[in-house]
Every structure is written in C-alpha cells, then in structure tokens.
Image (spheres, rainbow, N blue to C red):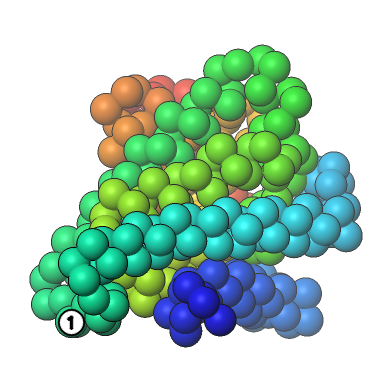
C-alpha cells in the first residue's frame, strides 16, 4: 500500500470511526431512552424549533468534511513519508521503524499538540466571528445548529472546516512530532472531546467535564443567541478566552419542565 501502512491508515480512519461511534451512543440514549433527559441542555422540542439545519443536511455536511479531512491527512502523510524516505536514501539505507518512545515523551507531544490545536482554533474561530463576510459566508453554517447535538459537532462549511479544523490538526501533528500511531490516539481523543462539547448533555459523572472547564455547557454559551462573541476556545482549554477577555461567566441550572439550562451572568465579573 506504499506509504499507507497500518499506522497511517489508523490515523486517517480512526477519528472518523470514533466520531460516529461516540455520537451514535448519545443519539441512541437521547432519542430512544429518557436516561439522560435530566441532564439535557435543550429539550427535544428546542432541537426541532431552534435548529435551521436538518439532520439529513448535517449528516451530509459532516461526511463531506470528513472526506476532505481524510484527503488532507493522506497528503500530509505523503509529504512527511517522502521526507523520511529521502533522509534514509541520503544515509544509504532503507528507512527503519523508529523505536517506541518513552511514555513521558509521548505525553509531552500530546501536550504540545493540544496547545497548538487550541491556539489555532481559537484565533481562526474568533476571526470567523470578527469578519462579517467570513461569518456569513462560512461559519454561520455551524451556527445553524443553535441547540447542539453530538453528531453535529463537525457540521460546517467546507472552507470553515478546512481552515479551523483540518489545518489546525495538521499543524498540531507536525509541531508535536508525534508518530502516526500516537497521533491516531490523539485525534481520536480530540474528536471525542469535540463531540462531547456539542452533545447537549451536562452529566455530572462525565469525566471530560471534570477534567476540562471547556465542556458542553461552556460551548453551549457560544451557540446561544448573543454568545457568538464569547467562549471561542476549543476543544481543550479556556486559556485564550481568559487571556484575551472573551470568556463568559455562566451557571448551569435546573430548567422549568425538566432538564438543565445554561444561564449567562449579566455581571461578567462573576465566575462559578
């Protein structure tokens, strides 16, 4: 298969599989049972009335975005593989598999990738909202889903998807120097985190909510009417929002009629 060895194939396809598997779990639990209803941030009725994009359009949009991501992934892997091959040829031998890295080195590469991904996505995301043309032409697609749900996480205009999601992933991969197998694990984790941020469920036992302040409720603020100037950070930390004054203070409260709701404070000096 040439440059597309097992690890490269895993890197290309595993995030896609993780996206549909993880969002599928939420879809089954929310549409076929009432197990998570007490933790929903939006009722079933709100999903129907607030969202301008149909579920069919969302599925088609996500599949297109993932096809583009896969194509760019193949291109990046081809370029990096050719570079390794040229280096091996210059050394007079065939490329040999690199030895497994120590766990601390892998962890450090993960942190670098997380920071690069967050920085790229924050500034590109903020640009998409700051430019009236870029918002109306591209980013507004994503905000057609005002009451987010899990498999709409990657729903966006293809240009927005490439600039914000795909290129940030390529930058994180190249900057961190992760080998393909470690990168596959990282992007599966990032994908699951992005799906969870859009799932519309704020369950107290969710470990991602305990580990990250940037969670489902945090991102729900951004999708609310008037929230488009706040909470740009994604998918891991709130660092850039805090440093640049774009973090909104909010609280998660019980909603009349059941479930939960996210309320943004009028006094933005308050944080809970």
Residue 260 seen in render: no
- Most extreme residue toward the front is 92
Foreground: 231 or 119? 119
Q: Position of residue 245 (x, y in %)?
A: 34, 23
Q: Position of residue 50 (x, y in %)?
A: 80, 43
Foreground: 105 or 233? 105
Residue at horizontal 40%, vertical 64%? 81
Q: Position of residue 188 (x, y in %)?
A: 46, 70
Residue at horizontal 28%, vertical 67%? 89
Foreground: 171 or 42? 171
Instruction: Work out which quarter of the rendered image holds the C terminus and state it.
Output: top left
Instruction: Work out which quarter of the rendered image holds the N terminus and state it.
Output: bottom right
Label 1: how many Cα within 10 Å (few below 14, some 14–19, many 20+): few
Q: Position of residue 61 (x, y in %)?
A: 78, 53
Q: Quadrant location of residue 96?
A: bottom left
Residue at horizontal 74%, vertical 61%? 63
Instruction: Tell me if residue 57 comes above or below residue 95 in the rendering.
Output: above
Q: Quadrant location of residue 132?
A: top right
Q: Secondary structure at mark 1?
A: loop
Residue at horizontal 48%, vertical 61%? 78
Does 218 sit left or right of 145 as displayed? Answer: left
Does 170 sit left or right of 245 as displayed? Answer: right
Q: Which residue is mark 1?
A: 99
């Amino acid at each position: 298969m040439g440059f597309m060895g097992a690890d490269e194939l895993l890197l290309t396809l595993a995030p896609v599989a993780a996206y549909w598997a993880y969002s599928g779990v939420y879809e089954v639990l929310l549409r076929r049972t009432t197990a998570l209803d007490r933790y929903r941030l939006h009722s079933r009725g709100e999903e129907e009335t607030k969202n301008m994009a149909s579920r069919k359009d969302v599925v088609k949009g996500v599949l297109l975005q993932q096809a583009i991501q896969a194509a760019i992934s193949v291109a990046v892997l081809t370029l990096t593989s050719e570079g390794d091959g040229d280096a091996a040829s210059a050394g007079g031998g065939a490329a040999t598999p690199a030895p497994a890295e120590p766990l601390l080195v892998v962890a450090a590469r993960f942190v670098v990738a997380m920071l690069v991904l967050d920085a790229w996505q924050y500034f590109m995301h903020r640009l998409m909202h700051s430019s009236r043309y870029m918002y109306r032409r591209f980013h507004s697609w994503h905000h057609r889903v005002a009451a987010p749900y899990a498999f709409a996480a990657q729903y966006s205009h293809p240009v927005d998807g490439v600039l914000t999601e795909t290129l940030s992933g390529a930058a994180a991969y190249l900057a961190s120097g992760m080998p393909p197998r470690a990168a596959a694990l990282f992007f599966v984790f990032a994908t699951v985190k992005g799906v969870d941020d859009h799932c519309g469920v704020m369950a107290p036992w969710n470990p991602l909510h305990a580990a990250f302040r940037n969670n489902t409720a945090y991102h729900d603020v951004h999708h609310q009417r008037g929230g488009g100037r706040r909470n740009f950070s994604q998918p891991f930390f709130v660092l850039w929002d805090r440093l640049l004054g774009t973090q909104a203070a909010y609280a998660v409260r019980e909603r009349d009629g059941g479930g939960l709701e996210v309320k943004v404070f009028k006094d933005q000096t308050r944080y809970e």
